[in-house]
Amino acid sequence: MTTQDLDFFKEKLGDLNEGFGYEYNMFCCEQAIIIATALQTKDKIIEFNKADSNTQFKMVPGLSDDHSGNTFGMSCKIAIAYIPRLIENVRDEKIDIINS
C-alpha cells in the first residue's frame, strides 16, 4: 500500500486505530485494493459481493480466505470508494512514463 493510499483511507475512514482496531482496518483496506483492482467498477463489486464464495475467488484472485462477514462487507464498501484512486494511479503511471 502506498503512502497516498494510506492517506486516502485515513481521509475516508478516520483514525484506523478506532473501531475494531488497526489490523482489522488495514486488512479491509488492503483487501479493498485487491477487489477494486480486479473488478474496477461499482456494478462489478456489487455483483461480486452478492456472489457465492467460489465465484468470488474466481472473480478476485488473491482474495483472502480469512474474511469474516464484517471484513468482507467493509472491504467491498471501501473498494467502491477506492475506484477513483485506481484512475489516479493509472494517470500517474502514464505521466511517469511520459516524463522518463
Image (cartoon, rainbow, N blue to C red):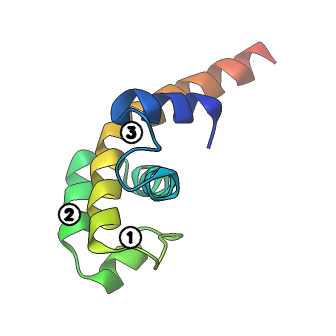
Query: How far across and how far down the image is residue 34, in percent?
Result: 49, 56
> Residue at left 26%, top 61%?
73
- Specify the amino acid type for callout 1: Met
Left or right: residue 25 versus residue 71 is right
User: Is there a contact, CB below 8 Å, between mark 3 and mark 2?
Assistant: no
Whether 31 is drawn above or below 57: the answer is above
- Which of the two discs, 1 and 3, labels the residue nearer the N terminus? 1
Left or right: residue 20 versus residue 89 is left
> Residue at left 49%, top 26%?
88
- Which of the two discs, 2 and 1, labels the residue nearer the N terminus? 2
Q: In which quarter of the image is residue 24?
A: bottom left
Q: Mark 2 points at which residue?
A: 47
Query: Which residue appears farthest toward the top when viewing the image?
Result: 99
Tell me if mark 1 has few (under 14), some (14-19) or many (20+) residues whose alpha carbon lies within 10 angstroms of its own: some
Number of numbered discs visible in the structure rendering: 3
> Residue at left 45%, top 32%?
10
Q: Which of marks 3 and 2 is in front?
A: 3
